[in-house]
Image (spheres, helix red, strand yellow):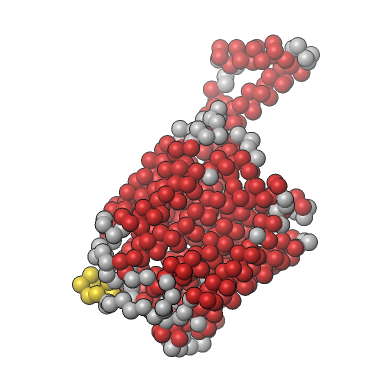
């Protein structure tokens, strides 16, 4: 268990200004996270240009996420085996080159292969960059460093829909991937110039690759992601293949955990979960991932499906969340030097809950900027969670464990995000059916309001149609209105559920151990 009493002195292993290192690694992270959200906006355009169905086009996201998630927890071993700096540069090169392949693809099959390769290259960018960043700064400045890193991880998914919508509508979806090429080249140059491996990385001997562990990891993560992507379409556990896939997930996960606990040189060191702060931090980042990705998915869908916004207009409508996050990041970095980080985390989750209740006040006649402040403050409070949580979760670990821990930490966030996206989409579909049934029951032929609405519409339509057509069209208009109202109520339910999830996450912060400001606390 981590102790707060034993302090480990900080020793710098590089003469480079740490803010130059932060800029280099943040650029790579920003590129990878931005690409994920841009690709989701470009999906309909990709399917249309390649004559692929919507279901086929979603594999563009699935292939990326599976490969990305598999590499995340394994990034610690690869960093020790090949050198962290060299591994990071190779991953950026793979990600950048595969971005070119995706943009140049002439068939869906080629895109899926290139996206899987891109996911493998992008999987290590976040954890390796995070580990480099934390080790490059003295403990008293790590809050500010994580605030800088937060620009890449929190702001990028918010800017992605806006930028992706503008690129796909102004140019072509291919430029949503070609844009990574200059960013990747610049990131490679900066990392080559400024990043240096610490001695424990240069002198590491991780042993042979645990191929069995990697295979089991790929199986359970791949099966889980496929279930989450296709579950709603196939009625979840009502489908035989989903039940079998769930069995595969459980068996492969148990086998993976057993393998990693018993192996002499495991692919992933699960011993870090003995640290209380890290275990609780992983739980909270898992919930945080579900909440933030649920919100990021929900609002553009609301604007596009119910209000008929274009992808660009929807992106602009949700862009204020990025403004809120930009304001929060440096502020939180400063507050962490003066206020207990656990309190900031709890304030962040409570603020996100309030913002979701605020967003639940949405209605069909809102303007593009009606929810401006609710969306802005949601981004602001998300910044209060991300920055201090990462610092507290890994603040009680020695530097030698941060690389391995960062991969697991980011895996929990991504898996939480995938589950969150799947849940909000399922809730929309299921609750819409419930609300429609309730509303239809209210449209009784004996209802005077219903009869008045039908007669009123029929009277207007008789000016252009015969009586039979006028009645049919009047009933169609009422049915469309019912469906629209049912959909609106399902989105409101979703926002309420996200608010409840945020509130339930607040008290978990009390279980975290306090980290003294200005020093690094070692585990022992």
| Depth check, front residue: 349 or 463 | 349
Image vertical order of residue 134 relative to residue 428, above or below: below
Residue drawn at 59 percent across, 49 percent down: 161
Q: Position of residue 359 (x, y in %)?
A: 46, 37
Image vertical order of residue 90 relative to residue 162, above or below: below
- The reply to whether residue 134 is in sight is yes
Q: Position of residue 81 (x, y in %)?
A: 50, 84
Locate the N terminus by quadrant: bottom left
| Depth check, front residue: 439 or 26 | 26
Image quadrant assignment for residue 141:
bottom left
Horizontal side, residue 301 vs residue 374: left or right: right
Q: Position of residue 357 (x, y in %)?
A: 41, 38
Q: In the displayed image of the protein, which residue is found farthest to the left?
A: 5
Locate the C terminus by quadrant: bottom left
Horizontal side, residue 120 vs residue 75: left or right: right
Residue drawn at 40 percent across, 62 percent down: 146
| Depth check, front residue: 345 or 141 | 141
Residue drawn at 33 percent across, 71 percent down: 138
Image vertical order of residue 4 relative to residue 47, above or below: below
Horizontal side, residue 431 vs residue 399: left or right: right
Q: Position of residue 13 (x, y in %)?
A: 39, 80
Image vertical order of residue 29 relative to residue 229, above or below: below
Residue drawn at 75 percent across, 50 percent down: 48
Horizontal side, residue 16 vs residue 513: left or right: right
- The reply to whether residue 420 is in sight is no
């Amino acid at each position: 268990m981590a102790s707060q009493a034993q302090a480990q002195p900080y020793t710098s292993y590089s003469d480079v200004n740490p803010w130059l290192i932060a800029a280099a690694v943040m650029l790579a992270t920003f590129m990878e996270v931005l690409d994920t959200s841009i690709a989701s906006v470009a999906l309909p355009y990709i399917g249309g240009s390649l004559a692929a169905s919507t279901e086929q086009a979603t594999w563009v996201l699935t292939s990326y996420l599976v490969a990305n998630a598999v590499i995340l927890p394994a990034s610690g071993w690869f960093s020790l085996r090949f050198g962290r700096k060299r591994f990071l540069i190779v991953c950026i090169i793979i990600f950048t080159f595969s971005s070119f392949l995706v943009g140049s693809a002439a068939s869906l099959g080629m895109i899926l292969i290139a996206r899987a390769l891109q996911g493998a290259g992008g999987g290590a960018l976040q954890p390796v960059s995070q580990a480099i960043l934390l080790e490059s700064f003295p403990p008293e400045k790590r809050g500010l460093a994580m605030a800088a890193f937060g620009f890449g991880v929190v702001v990028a998914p918010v800017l992605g829909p806006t930028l992706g919508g503008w690129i796909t509508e102004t140019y072509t979806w291919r430029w949503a991937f070609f844009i990574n090429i200059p960013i990747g080249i610049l990131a490679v140059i900066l990392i080559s110039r400024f990043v240096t491996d610490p001695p424990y990385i240069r002198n590491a001997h991780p042993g042979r690759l645990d191929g069995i562990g990697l295979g089991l990891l790929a199986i359970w993560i791949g099966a889980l992601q496929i279930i989450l992507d296709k579950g709603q379409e196939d009625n979840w556990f009502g489908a035989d293949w989903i039940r079998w896939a769930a069995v595969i997930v459980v068996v492969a996960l148990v086998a993976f955990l057993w393998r990693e606990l018993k192996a002499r040189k495991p692919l992933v060191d699960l011993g870090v979960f003995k640290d209380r702060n890290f275990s609780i931090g992983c739980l909270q980042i898992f919930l945080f991932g579900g909440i933030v990705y649920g919100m990021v998915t929900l609002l553009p869908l609301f604007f596009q499906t119910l209000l008929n916004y274009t992808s660009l207009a929807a992106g602009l409508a949700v862009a204020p969340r990025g403004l809120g996050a930009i304001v929060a990041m440096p502020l939180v970095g400063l507050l962490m030097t003066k206020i207990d980080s656990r309190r900031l985390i709890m304030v962040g989750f409570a603020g996100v809950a309030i913002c979701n209740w605020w967003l639940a006040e949405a209605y069909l006649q809102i303007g593009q900027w009606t929810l401006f402040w609710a969306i802005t403050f949601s981004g602001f409070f998300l910044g209060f969670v991300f920055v201090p949580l990462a610092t507290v979760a890994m603040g009680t670990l020695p530097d030698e464990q941060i690389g391995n821990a960062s991969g697991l930490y980011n895996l929990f966030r991504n898996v939480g995000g995938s589950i969150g996206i799947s849940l909000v989409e399922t809730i929309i579909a299921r609750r819409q059916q419930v609300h429609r049934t309730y509303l239809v029951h209210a449209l009784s032929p004996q209802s005077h309001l219903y009869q008045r609405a039908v007669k009123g519409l029929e009277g207007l339509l008789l000016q252009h149609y015969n009586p039979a057509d006028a009645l049919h069209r009047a009933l169609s208009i009422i049915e469309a209105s019912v469906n629209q109202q049912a959909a609106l109520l399902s989105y409101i339910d979703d926002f309420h559920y996200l608010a409840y999830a945020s509130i339930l996450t607040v008290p978990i912060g009390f279980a975290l151990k306090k980290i003294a400001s200005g020093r690094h606390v070692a585990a022992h």
